[in-house]
Image (cartoon, rainbow, N blue to C red):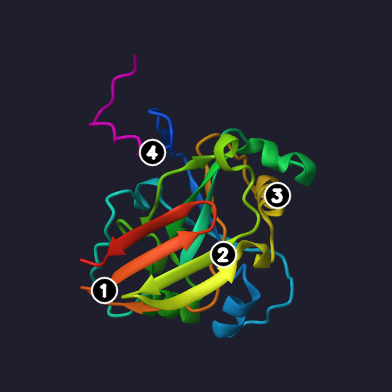
């Protein structure tokens, strides 16, 4: 057994509905502007162009049930997304075989320090300062493919203090799950434990301390996330 020079970081693991075993997280890939209406509201052309991805860190995924408002920002936005969990991977995966690598799906939030992301965009810099801060991805329990099948349609909804802010349908994704997996595998060697956040519908906007976010995706349940 290897000995380490410092204490090894803990493995990030997420709960799975119906079983006691947890899902260990390896990497987190996030697709940008994957719903046409969201692309428009962010000032971009909704036409189908090659997808682009950024990354969060595995330990950004948070199962605490609350969102801790981060420092160095006064404009933090909500983005509801479906997370796709992989049980296997590889290089140059064909679209026709892509879903064979999916373990399950979960509710997730891609919380964003929009002001810091905006500065990074204008400067041509990476987005991580706006996207990959601590506890920036509240996530729900994973529902396995055996339980829910492959979730490719269903209402997506986010409310803040009871008011609907985001709504759409998974079938509105520009790049579907098999396409995302195939595309990513051309540039990265995917593996078990990888997570893909599949994009957010229109309606993103700010939250403040004391707000309560209620999120749901048809087939994947719901969760309530207070902002603290």
Say whether residue 150 is magenta: no
Q: Tell me which segment is drawn in magenta.
A: 1-15
Which residue is identified by label 3? 178
Which residue is identified by label 4? 15
Quarter of the image that includes the N terminus: top left
Do the numbered discs 3 and 1 sit on residues whose CB atoms are within 8 Å?
no
Under tag 1, what secondary structure?
A: loop
- Of the residues under marks 2 and 1, which one precedes in the sequence? 2
Say whether residue 2 is magenta: yes
Under tag 3, what secondary structure?
A: helix
Q: Main secondary structure of the magenta part?
A: loop
Q: CA distance from mark 2 to mark 4?
A: 23 Å
Please, is residue 88 above or below residue 95 in the view? above
Residue 163 in percent (x, y) is at 38, 79
Q: CA distance from mark 2 to mark 1?
A: 23 Å
What is the number of the mark on residue 155? Answer: 2
Under tag 2, what secondary structure?
A: strand
């Amino acid at each position: 057994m290897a000995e380490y020079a410092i204490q090894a970081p803990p493995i990030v693991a997420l709960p799975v509905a119906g079983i006691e075993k947890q899902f260990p997280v390896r990497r987190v890939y996030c697709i940008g502007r994957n719903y046409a209406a969201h692309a428009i509201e962010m000032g971009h052309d909704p036409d189908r162009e090659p997808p682009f991805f950024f990354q969060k860190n595995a330990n950004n995924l948070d199962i605490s049930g609350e969102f801790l408002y981060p420092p160095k920002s006064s404009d933090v936005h909500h983005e509801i997304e479906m997370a796709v969990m992989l049980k296997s991977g590889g290089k140059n995966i064909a679209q026709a075989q892509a879903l064979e690598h999916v373990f399950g799906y979960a509710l997730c939030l891609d919380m964003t320090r929009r002001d810091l992301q905006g500065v990074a965009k204008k400067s041509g810099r990476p987005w991580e300062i706006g996207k990959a801060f601590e506890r920036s991805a509240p996530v729900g329990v994973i529902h396995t493919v055996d339980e829910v099948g492959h979730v490719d349609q269903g209402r997506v909804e986010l409310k803040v203090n009871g008011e609907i802010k985001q709504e759409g349908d998974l079938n509105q994704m520009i790049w579907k799950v098999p396409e995302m997996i195939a595309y990513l595998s051309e540039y990265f060697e995917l593996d078990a434990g990888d997570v893909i956040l599949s994009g957010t519908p229109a309606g993103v906007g700010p939250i403040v301390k004391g707000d309560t976010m209620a999120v749901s995706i048809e087939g994947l349940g719901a969760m309530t996330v207070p902002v603290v």
